[in-house]
Amino acid sequence: MSERLTADDVVFELRDVCVKLPAGPTGRDILRQVDAKVHAGEIIGIIGPSGTGKTTLLRVLSGLQLPTTGSSLLGGQPVSGPSRDAVTVFQDYNTALLPWRTVAKNVALPLEGRVGKAERKERVHKALEIVGLADRGGEYPWRLSGGMQQRVQIARALVVEPKVLLMDEPFGALDAITKGALHDQLMDVQAQTGQTIIFITHDVDEAVYLADRVLVIHGTPGSIVHEVTTKLPRPRDQIATRDLPRFHEVRHELAEVLRHGKSA
Ligand SMILES: Nc1ncnc2c1ncn2[C@@H]1O[C@H](COP(=O)(O)OP(=O)(O)OP(=O)(O)O)[C@@H](O)[C@H]1O
Ligand SMILES: [Mg+2]
């Protein structure tokens, strides 16, 4: 991928992606005819009922799952496996951290062998500060609460400063206040770095508040049944943005699609 990306650059392109996974004698169709383009610097929210293939779609984007048919391109190149340009925050935070490493050493992991010790220390501290855990670096992850462990995982992704951040329900385990603070921190980082972010959520309000564009996945097999561009001004504000008529309009539109499972 080129170093300097502009909004005209397509980061991801999915062309007629279908995924079939092993189940019984014939396998099960999980995703069907998924077409999507994601541009540099976009924040994309993915929402849809449980079991419709959202995590599977993120695995396709990360290169952990190859499409059964169709293609997935990152920076114009076919994805053949995980790339350093795209880092994933997994849905299951319990198994994502190494229990024998301290919080700081878990966060430092992706930098080992790549950057010097002093820079590593500085970047780890900055990442932990963003997620509000700067004072817990010396502890082991299993001594932290579930929400804290999830924040450590987010810090470990941020420390890489990746071009693309893929996040699977990253805020699910957090209380409303921590969640709001982390939303705003993440959007600040994104505004400074121009990162592309694709996140999954079950929370309609969260999708609207964070995203430039929300994709709704629905059905069995799952496909993108609806897409809405939020068109809300940035920077966003937890109170003012949520009071805007447009916020309510988008929220309503998404709630309707989620209820009926098809584009309104
Ligand atoms: N490794 C696998 N092998 C076979 N089937 C799988 C595998 N992983 C997921 N599936 C199936 O794919 C379907 C979609 O799963 P996926 O995890 O993508 O859903 P999801 O939309 O992320 O759901 P949730 O909102 O509950 O996280 C499910 O029916 C699941 O059983
Ligand atoms: Mg999932």
Image (spheres, rainbow, N blue to C red):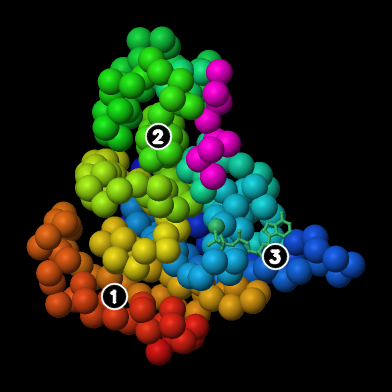
**Residue 190 appears in the picture as rendered:** no
Ligand 2: image quarter:
bottom right
Q: Is residue 68 above or below residue 195?
A: below
Residue 111 at what x, y percent from top left? 47, 22
- What's the CA distance linking mark 1 and mark 3? 29 Å
- Chain-order first, disc 1 or disc 3: 3
Residue 258 at what x, y percent from top left? 43, 78
What residue is shown with label 1? 251
Which of labels 1 and 2 is toward the front?
2
Which of labels 1 and 3 is toward the front?
1
Kind of residue indicated by mark 2: Ser
Residue at 65% of width from left, 62% of height from top?
71
Please name whichever residue, 264 or 99, is drawn nearer the observer in this view of the structure. Answer: 99
- What's the CA distance linking mark 2 and mark 3? 35 Å
Left or right for 58, reference 252: right
- What's the CA distance linking mark 1 and mark 2? 31 Å
Q: Quadrant of the C terminus?
A: bottom left
Ligand 1 closer than 8 Å to label 1 CB: no
Kind of residue indicated by mark 3: Val
Q: Which mark is residue 145?
A: 2
What residue is shown with label 3? 19
Please report the bounds of the magenta region as a residue range: 92-100
Residue 127 at what x, y percent from top left? 33, 29
Residue at 80% of width from left, 63% of height from top?
23
Kind of residue indicated by mark 1: Arg
Mark 1 falls on what kind of element? helix
Residue at 74% of width from left, 65% of height from top?
20
- Chain-order first, disc 1 or disc 2: 2
Mark 3 falls on what kind of element? strand
